[in-house]
Amino acid sequence: MKINAVHVWQVSLPLNEGSYRWAGGKSVDVFDSTLLAIDTDEGITGWGEVCPLGPVYLPAYAEGVRGGIQKLGPHLLGLDPREHAVLWQVMDDQLKGHPFVKSGLDMAAWDILGKVTGLPVATLLGGITSREIPLYRAISQRPAEEMAANLRSYRDDGYRRFQLKVGGDPDEDIRRIRACRAILEPSDKLVADANTGWLPADAMRVVNAVRDLDVFIEQPCLSYDECLSIRARTTLPFVLDENIDGLEPLLRAAHDRAMDMVNIKLSKLGGLTQARLVRDLCARLGMLMIVEDSWGGDVATAAIAHAAASTPVRNLFAATDFNGYVTHSFADGAPRRMGGTMCLPDGPGLGVTPRRDELGPPAFTIA
Ligand code: MG
C-alpha cells in the first residue's frame, strides 16, 4: 500500500460562547483548523486534523500546519501509511521539530491502519479500556462571578470535571477558584489551570490562599524550574502541561516527582504515535492524565476519543470534546457529548467521515 495524495482543507470553527479566553489576556474567537486526507493506491483514505490554540499558546500556528504539510507531503508519497514508525522517521528526517505539523499526518496513517485491519484505532493503541470517556469542561477566563455561573450551567449539563482558566490577577484568581469550588459537590473535580501565567510569587500567593480546597494546580508558571519550585512548596495535587512536550521533559519531571498529572495533547507531542509512547509511560509511572489536543473539530475529537478510550481507566482524569465547543460540524460519526461523557465512535479506524461535498475543493493537494 502506498500514499498517492495528501489533500488539505482549511476549516473555520467559531465558538459557541463567542470567544475563549485564558491567561495573559489571550483569546480566540474563531479557530483555524487544518483537515487533511491521505489517499492510498488501494482506495483507502485516512483523515487527520490539527488545530493550534492560536499562535501564542504553544509554539504552533495554523498557517504553519499547512506550510509544514506542503514541505513534508512530497516526502510521504510512495510510503506505506501502515508503517507508522517508518513514516515518523521520514517526517523527522525531513523536518526538524514542529511536532504539530506531523500530528495530522500521523493521525491519518492510524485511521488507514484501522480501516485496513477493520479495527478501531483504540484497539490498535493497546485496547479499549472503556467506550465511555469522562470529559472535563474548560471554563473560559472571565470575572469570578461569571465563571461560577458558567460552571454551574455546565454542571447542570452533566459535566463533573472542570478546568478553570486562571493565570491572571492572583487576587481575582483566588476569588475564581473559591467561587467555583463552592458550587461543586465533593466528588466533582476541579483544576485551576494558569497556563504559565503566574510569576512564582503570584503562584505561591494563590496556592497558599486555596490550600484548604480540593483543587489541582496546573502549569502555574512559564518555566519548568519555576513550576518545580511551586510544586515543592504546596500540598495541592499538581499538573504539568506546556512543559511536557516530549519524552525527555517527561522523564526529567518523573525523576523530579514534579507532577501528579500530565496533560497529553496530541499535536503538542506529534500525534498518536508519540502520544501513545508518553501515555503508556505515564500509566506505568502512576500518573493521572488528561488526554486531549490543543483544539479541533470532529476529526481531532475522534482521535482524542480513541487515545482516551485506550488509556487505563484509573489513569484517565478526563478527555475533551472540542467539537462540542464549536458551532461547526463537518463529519459524520464524530463522538458527541452525552452529559459528562462521550462515547468512542463505532467502526474501523477513527470511525469518523468528513462530508467532502460540504468541504468543497481542498486548499491544496500534494500528489
Ligand atoms: Mg493546560
Image (tube, rainbow, N blue to C red):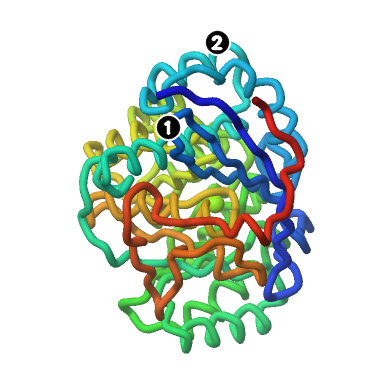
Q: Quadrant of the N terminus?
A: top left
Residue situated in front as seen by the camera: 353 or 222: 353
Quadrant in the rendering for residue 70: top right
Q: How many numbered badges does the structure rendering display? A: 2
Which quadrant, please, contains the C terminus?
A: top right
Residue 329 image offset from top left, x and y in percent: 60, 66
Q: Is residue 126 left or right of residue 229?
A: left
Relative to 141, residue 263 above or below:
above
Which quadrant of the view contains residue 242? top right
Of the residues under marks 1 and 2, which one precedes in the sequence?
Answer: 1
Pointer 1 residue Cβ closer than 8 Å to ligand 1: no
The kind of residue tagged 1 is Glu
Residue 309 in picture, x, y percent from top left: 30, 55
Query: Residue 62: percent from the left, percent from the top?
Result: 73, 42
Residue visible at 37% across and 72% down in the picture:
341
* Gap between marks 1 and 2 measured at Cα: 26 Å
Mark 1, secondary structure of its residue: loop
What residue is shown with label 1?
Answer: 42
Mark 2 residue's CB less than 8 Å from ligand 1:
no
Residue 34 image-quadrant placement = top right
- Circle 2 packing at 10 Å, graded few (<14), some (14-19), many (20+), is few
Give the answer, above or below, for where 44 lies relative to 171. above
Name which residue type carries label 2: Asp
Q: In this rendering, which labeled residue sits more in front, label 1 or label 2?
A: 1
Label 2 belongs to which residue?
93
The residue shown at (64%, 18%) is 74
Q: Which residue lies at the image location 76% right of the left edge and 61% below the top edge?
A: 30
